[in-house]
Image (cartoon, grey):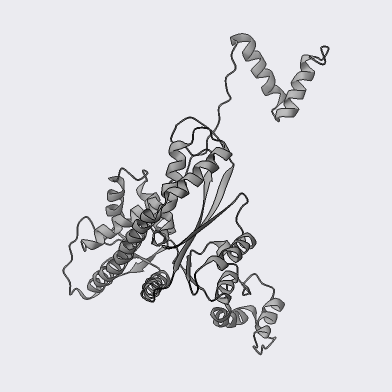
Amino acid sequence: MNEPSISVRQIRKQISETLGVGERSIQTIITTYKETNTVAAPKQTRKKKSFRDVFDEFSKNAVRRHVHTIWFRREILTVDKIHQAVSADDSLPSISRTNLFHLLKDLDFRYSKRSRNSTMTEKNEIVVWRRIYLGNIKKYREEGRHIYFLDETWVNAGDCTSKTWAQKMAFYLVVYCVSSRKKNTSDYHDEMNGDTFRKWMEGILPLLQPNSVNVMDNASYHSVKIDRAPTSNTRKADIIKWLEDKGEVINHSMVIPELLHIVKRLKPIHNKYVIDELVKAKNHTVLRLPPYHCELNPIELAWSSVKNHVRMNNTTYKLPDVKKLLIEGIKRVDAEMWKNFISHTKKEETTFYKVDKIIDEVLSAEKSDDLTMTITGDTSSETDSDSEYIFCKYGFNFCQ
């Protein structure tokens, strides 16, 4: 020791300050060691994961597949029926009926009253957004335009198949842009934000084929607006200025709700995104995926393959080794594999078209009683009972 005269109390204090552990805890550990010659690791209280943490995008898409299966049988869909199908699927995490109900609400279902039953349908704007997307992607393919699919993911240094505990907070954030003819990759250590993504996009655009289509989701860093519209939290003077900048003649005696009503009318006209305008200026097109539809992006399948490669081969939990595995996993996604991912996603698009039509027919028949439907399980309607809601979900698994 450099200081042989230092007291035990001083040592305990130094250890406490260095580790950020109370002196009493240090003393308890020392006492335990003197008595047993062992040091027990302190018990760690682990926060219980919620169903939102456990159900990733692929699991959510699997739930949608079960919904589709029931609709294709033209059966009225209830929470109990969905829960029964999900519970019987060994590939899915276990979930209570109540949590499944909340999961479906997270996916943007809403209550709707039908003639015989209370139902839970997808929001109309989501349905319309999806139908427009499917129509556009089909048109762009027929025009022979290059279609690039863009997505981001992260790989944790602790990803592995072993149950050995290893806590690693370091990760790689990976941005991937792929078409059936060309692929480009970049990776970032730092958290993704609007500025970082814009700079990355500026570097990618010169590499793309002319007049290409760029498919992306609605992540916040994809959706930075050029001119953000006022909200109810905006100062009245700023609302008036925003409106007058748009050429509106405003009566300053108007109250905020009246001003926001005008904002609502003008908002769609001025709702422009930084990325969309950047891409448009280079003679390319941005096509945005509808919310909660990652299955329409085939890169999700590529991510699954890459992450599985990392997970199966990660034994060191060291970031440089994980980076090496990540690069190996990306290289494994060859042209043939990508072709299969595209083919799979096209089948998912077809499924969306079909299930939308079936749901439309079933719900129309629910009103007119012109169609005889196969009904299984208890579908009686009770006020304020979520057990009888009909779910009209159109989602499905995988990506284009």
Look at the picture and state if 139 lies above or below 38.
Answer: below
108 relative to 62 in the view: left or right: right
- Quarter of the figure with residue 242: bottom right
262 w.r.t. 166: above or below: below
Quarter of the image that includes the N terminus: top right
Q: Can the viewer see residue 55? A: no
Quarter of the image with the C terminus is: bottom left
Is residue 64 toward the left or the right of residue 331 in the image?
Answer: left
Camera-nearest residue between 141 and 76: 141
Residue name at image x 55 percent, y 30 percent: 44
User: In this rendering, would 266 be left or right of 145?
Assistant: right
Identity of the residue drawn at 53% across and 61% down: 219
Q: Nearer the viewer, residue 74 or 159?
A: 159
Q: Which residue is drawn at 58% across and 76% down?
A: 281
Q: In this view, does 80 lie above or below 72?
A: above
Q: Residue at x 52, y 45 (%)?
A: 155
Is residue 277 at least partly visible in the picture?
yes
Q: Position of residue 367 (x, y in %)?
A: 25, 74
- The image shows residue 322 at horizontal and vertical percentages of 53, 40
Q: Position of residue 74 (x, y in %)?
A: 21, 64
Residue with the most extreme left position: 372
Relative height, residue 351 to residue 156 (above, below): below
Q: Quadrant of residue 265?
A: bottom right
In the figure, is residue 199 to the left or right of 349?
Answer: right
Residue 91 at what x, y percent from top left? 33, 44
Residue in the foreground of this view, choosing between 42 and 377? 42
